[in-house]
Image (cartoon, rainbow, N blue to C red):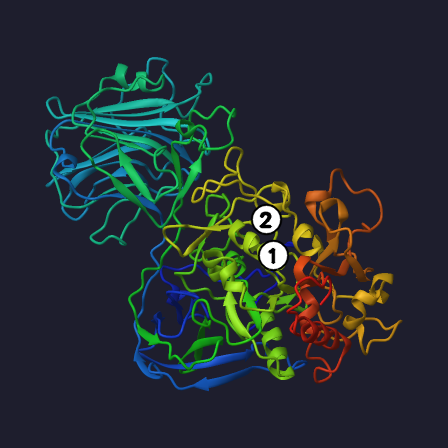
């Protein structure tokens, strides 16, 4: 399939796909699915979830070898494998239910049938974009329950029903009778976006009077969004129901069937079984909290979990659904503390979005128990229904603690998750860590329990008419080369590395990265450093690696999290929100935490661009006897990678580039083997080292450096400093100097190195 072009440097694609209510209604994706894991061992069972518009589809297990359909390369290659799930399957539509919320199970204490009050601090980010629930136990089906919400016009409203009729009171101008606040602010204007205010509603069952308040935290003269509204409703009771209570959504008949999702932050929601007075409501602005609530949810507690704690004593605890953002500043954040763990009372808010999605929740369509004799490789469940086709890739690794080869291909699944469905590919429902939510805030979580439409073979992107396979498709260039050159290899993933550490790597003499291992956790960095220090050897065949601080939810092990700041990025985290909610560590760039990629692999991100690539020129370090094995069969003056490429058309140095930098940690004995420079003017230097506006010519730091150096005990690193390197491997039937150098290094690295005291392999 061919997709559209990006509009910014970091954007890999910009696809004008329409949003819809389910994945099956997104154009060009009537058939799609996902698996419950990316990595699996022999003897384990993998579940597959599929949505199909067609009543029947065919499934087939395939081993993926080359995923790029570009006619300039070897073409698409797959091998069909016998599997228990091969054959026809019944098709059914499975919708995506976006939108985060807090779920509190039904409880008699929540069924207020007489007087009550609902209060919460809110920070709306898209008021006026439709009805948005704040606290809701409302059932439209039988006109029962209650809801504090934002109305369609952006004003605060109260909705409740007695089982026969419903009453809606709002601060908007449509209310026929209202009492203005003491300062006589005009009532009826919608709320301003991104300002804290207290939203409250009361109902006195004795008098039938319902009141609604929207009171900004900071009151400016003639503030148009401040005000109250009261009306004598004629109602004197509230009907109960058996629905769960929701915060930031309106409940439905099932856990997934929610509506009226709130965009923005909510803090300190509370329920009382009496009508608070106007003075008590006003006192809330000053931190004077009325006693004896029915429920008082404190989001500043258990921030690093998906649990919600009720402090009323009634134990009306809940949990988040679809992973709204936690570790965000509350209405009382004063800027003195940036780490939520040190001042949790100032981080008592949760940021909800109507497009949050952490788990599609689809029903299982089929499963597969991996045979013990299935080789470690890249596989996929291929789905076909008429002309429609989809692949669900997965990676079969050896059993834990074992290896079937001396070489491991380390698949960058964290990076696959970061780019998952990026820049519009998944419509408005499937977002990547490069996208923004509908309210303009950056996406900080990504999950593998959703279809990942760009983690697919046969995906050809067109960036200003440059061929650009990326991530999964590009990494299959390496798999194909390993197969063609006859190199045995195991496949492992960085998620495996995250959980298992050095034990995963220690059986291997050589570890080879993918083309873009950008997102790494501390656990992964520690494990790789230990492996190298213990004599392991790394071939870093990519660019822009080891860049963003990333981690995986330690309890719900399917979600990665980042907080972007201080780097080359598509969005930036808000002040005070730089720490990961799931692990409590500071996000941003690894270099900001003293772990620049140069310290680990000798090179780090320096530039990026959409133009075609350029070749490398050998540098004096390439003639050092320590590096002689790398350039066997390569001429002294021979340009490296001055050939057609499957990435950016031409050249081994393209797309995103890395350079050595001794100040950032490149080891002093590292050899600069080759440098590629003279890239097109579209290539620009990374933002994190631009300290003032560029006024001169093209930055000299726009280049790629090829580096080699040794670790103690026989360890070593070979790094190419370019995402485009692997795109040259297959040129001229794999007979070219990019392929030759890669083969030279791999053969030497995998050779016997039992003498761990040697400096060089």
- Tag 1 residue: 11
Taking the image as shown, residue 103 lies to the left or right of residue 327, namely: left
Q: Nearer the viewer, residue 397 or 645?
A: 397
Residue depicted at x 44% and y 28%: 343
Residue 616 in view: no
| Residue 519 shows up from this direction | yes
Counting every numbered tag in the picture gives 2
Which circle's residue, 2 or 1, is located before the other in the chain?
A: 1
The quarter of the displayed image where residue 381 is located: bottom left
* Mark 2 in CB contact with mark 1 (< 8 angstroms): yes
The answer to whether residue 182 is above or below residue 157 is: above
Q: Quadrant of residue 277?
A: top left
> Dot 1: few (<14), some (14–19), or many (≥20) neighbours within 10 Å?
some
The answer to whether residue 148 is left or right of residue 487 is left
> What residue is drawn where x is 58% and y is 59%?
531
Q: Position of residue 32 (x, y in %)?
A: 40, 70
Horizontal and vertical percent for residue 75?
61, 82
**Picture coordinates of residue 548 (x, y %)?**
58, 49
Residue at image mark 2: 570
In the shown orientation, is residue 314 left or right of residue 738?
Answer: left
Q: Position of residue 64 (x, y in %)?
A: 51, 78
As drawn, 194 above or below 11:
above
Residue 646 circle label: none
Secondary structure at badge 1 equals loop
């Amino acid at each position: 399939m061919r997709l559209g072009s990006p509009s910014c440097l970091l954007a890999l694609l910009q696809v004008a796909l329409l949003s819809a209510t389910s994945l099956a209604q997104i154009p060009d994706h009537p058939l799609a699915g996902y698996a419950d894991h990316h990595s699996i061992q022999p003897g384990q069972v993998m579940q597959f979830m599929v949505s199909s518009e067609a009543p029947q589809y065919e499934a087939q297990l395939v081993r993926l070898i080359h995923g790029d359909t570009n006619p300039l390369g070897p073409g698409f290659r797959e091998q069909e494998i016998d599997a228990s799930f091969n054959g026809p399957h019944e098709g059914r539509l499975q919708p995506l239910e976006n939108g985060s919320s807090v779920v509190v199970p039904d409880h008699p204490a929540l069924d207020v049938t007489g007087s009550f009050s609902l209060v919460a601090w809110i920070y709306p980010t898209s008021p006026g974009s439709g009805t948005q629930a704040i606290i809701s136990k409302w059932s439209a089906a039988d006109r029962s329950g209650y809801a504090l919400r934002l109305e369609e016009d952006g004003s605060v409203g109260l909705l409740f029903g007695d089982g026969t009729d419903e009453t809606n009171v709002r601060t908007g101008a449509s209310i026929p009778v209202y009492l203005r606040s003491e300062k006589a602010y005009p009532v009826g204007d919608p709320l301003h976006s991104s300002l804290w205010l207290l939203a409250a509603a009361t109902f006195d069952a004795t008098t039938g009077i319902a009141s609604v308040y929207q009171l900004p935290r900071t009151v400016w003269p003639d503030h148009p969004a401040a005000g109250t509204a009261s009306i004598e409703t004629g109602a004197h009771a509230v009907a109960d129901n058996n629905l769960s209570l929701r915060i930031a959504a309106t409940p439905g008949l099932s856990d997934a069937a929610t509506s009226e999702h709130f965009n923005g932050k909510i803090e300190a929601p509370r329920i009382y079984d009496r009508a608070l007075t106007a003075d008590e409501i006003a006192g809330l602005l000053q931190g004077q909290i009325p006693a004896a609530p029915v429920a008082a949810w404190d989001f500043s507690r258990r921030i690093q979990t998906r649990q919600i704690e009720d402090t009323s004593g009634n134990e009306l605890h809940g949990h988040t659904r679809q992973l709204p953002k936690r570790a965000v500043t509350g209405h009382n954040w004063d800027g003195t503390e940036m780490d939520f763990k040190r001042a949790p009372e100032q981080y008592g808010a949760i940021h909800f979005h109507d497009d949050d999605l952490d788990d599609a929740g689809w029903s299982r369509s089929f499963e597969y128990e991996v045979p013990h004799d299935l080789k470690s490789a890249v596989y996929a469940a291929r789905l076909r229904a008429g002309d429609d086709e989809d692949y669900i890739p997965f990676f079969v690794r050896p059993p834990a603690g074992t290896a079937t080869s001396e070489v491991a291909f380390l698949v960058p699944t964290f990076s696959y998750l970061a780019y998952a469905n990026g820049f519009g590919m998944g419509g408005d429902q499937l977002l990547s860590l490069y996208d923004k939510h509908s309210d303009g805030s950056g996406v900080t979580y990504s999950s593998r329990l959703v279809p990942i439409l760009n983690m697919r073979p046969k995906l050809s992107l067109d960036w200003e008419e440059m061929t650009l396979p990326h991530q999964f498709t590009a990494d299959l260039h390496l798999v194909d080369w390993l197969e063609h050159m006859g190199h045995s290899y195991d496949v492992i993933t960085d998620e495996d590395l995250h959980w298992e550490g050095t034990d995963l790597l220690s059986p291997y003499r050589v570890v080879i990265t993918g083309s873009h291992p950008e997102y790494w956790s501390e656990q992964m960095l520690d494990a790789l450093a230990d492996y190298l220090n213990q004599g392991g050897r790394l071939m870093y065949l990519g660019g822009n690696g080891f860049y963003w601080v990333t981690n995986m939810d330690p309890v719900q092990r399917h979600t990665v999290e980042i907080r972007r700041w201080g780097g080359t990025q598509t969005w930036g985290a808000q002040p005070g929100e730089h720490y990961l909610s799931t692990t409590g560590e500071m996000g941003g760039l690894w270099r900001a935490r003293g772990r620049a990629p140069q310290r680990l692999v000798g090179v780090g991100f320096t530039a990026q661009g959409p133009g075609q690539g350029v070749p490398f020129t050998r540098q004096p370090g390439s003639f050092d006897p320590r590096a002689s094995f790398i350039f066997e069969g390569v001429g002294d003056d021979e340009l490296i990678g001055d050939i057609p490429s499957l990435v950016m058309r031409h050249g081994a140095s393209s797309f995103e580039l890395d350079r050595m930098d001794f100040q950032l940690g490149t080891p002093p004995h590292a050899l600069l083997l080759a440098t590629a420079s003279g890239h097109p003017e579209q290539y620009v230097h990374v933002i994190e080292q631009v300290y003032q506006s560029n006024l001169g010519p093209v930055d000299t730091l726009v280049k790629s450096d090829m580096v080699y150096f040794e670790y103690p005990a026989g360890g070593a690193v070979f790094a190419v400093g370019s995402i485009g390197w692997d795109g040259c491997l297959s040129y001229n039937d794999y007979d070219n100097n990019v392929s030759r150098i890669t083969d030279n290094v791999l053969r030497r690295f995998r050779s016997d190195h039992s003498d761990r005291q040697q400096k060089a392999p």
